[in-house]
Amino acid sequence: MIRFYELAVGACLLLAHHGVPAQPSWKPERPVEIVVTCQPGCGPDIAARTLQKIWQDHRIVPVPSVVVNKAGGGGAVAYGYIHQRPGDGHVLVLSGAGAVVNSIMGRGVGYKDITPIAMTAAEYVGIAVRADSGLSSGRELMDALKKDPQAVVFGIANSLGNANHQAVALAMKVEGVPPGKARNVVFQSGGHSIAALLGGHVQVVPASVGLWANPLKAGQVRLIAVSAPRRLGGELAQIPTWREQGVDAVISVWRMVTAPPGLTPAQLAFWREALRKTTATPEWKRDLEVSYQSDEFLAGAELDRALDALYAQLKPLLTELDLVKKP
């Protein structure tokens, strides 16, 4: 008995001496799917293709990757897709915080049902009208809605309750305008909602600020507010925030990567490190600057706390919008 104990201890010491890991490492062995929750041309789609290129150019991920668009249900289609593949480290979703919204609304797969990997960045929402619109400021928009909550039609991509919708609904709420009375038309991507604005089918569109760069340069639109806590830089420095116009509404669009439930610690560690390396590259930082996004990397317990806090923050607003499923 004593001899067996000595042999066991000796074996453990030998393994420790040679640095044998407690758990084997993992890396993907077949092509990785980067699933986005909207149509080509939307904010997450653009971000996913940036990830894809950086992974290939820097060999951060040792296998090819493909971007897969699965629009619908505020991300419910995409989240449902990965939820059906538990333990599969070869499929990811790049999206906003739609899984949190789904948890609140009782719509499909929520953020507790999948594996949050990391928040890679955040950007803000620009509220735009056509260049020939009679509305010249966010203040004028709120004053018009106070007189008539249905005075304009909003174009929302890609679902009610998401950050784009929140950026105008919260402004209405703090101004005493019932946000649930607004007239909204839902589009499958930011590109589609912008096209509808330019075509005169809707009057106001809230969308990620990065999507407004080209229409602004072409003189097609006017940004009347941004949902940031302070003014943005570069060509958007002249656009006032909601707060500057007396409306205390700050909303950010998350860029978060999630995976199926049931990932092993080794799979989770690989993807967290891969995303850390990605967000440290010059190409990623340059893309953030061009698209007016902020570097807000979160992972692990810090990300979990942020998700829970966002849930608590959004539930009252979505309840007022009558988007929360009744028990």
Image (cartoon, helix red, strand yellow):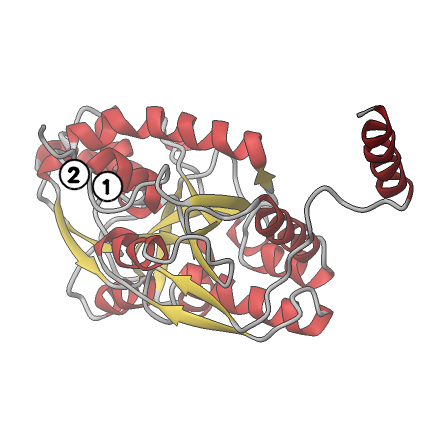
In this view of the protein, which residue sits in the foreground, 233 or 303? Answer: 303
Mark 1: amino acid: Leu
In this view of the protein, which residue sits in the foreground, 157 or 215? Answer: 157
Mark 2: amino acid: Ala
Number of numbered markers:
2
Disc 1 crowd, CA 10 A, few/some/many (<14, 14-19, 20+): some
Determine which residue is flagged by label 1: 141
Provide the secondary structure element on which disc 1 rests.
Answer: helix
Quadrant of residue 201 within the rendered picture: bottom left
Q: Position of residue 50 (x, y in %)?
A: 56, 66
Q: Are marks 2 and 1 in contact (CB under 8 Å)?
A: yes
Q: Position of residue 185 (x, y in %)?
A: 15, 56
Q: Position of residue 176 (x, y in %)?
A: 18, 24
Residue under the image location 14 percent in, 50 percent down:
184
Which disc is residue 80 wearing? none
Determine which residue is flagged by label 2: 144
Q: CA distance from mark 2 to mark 1?
A: 5 Å
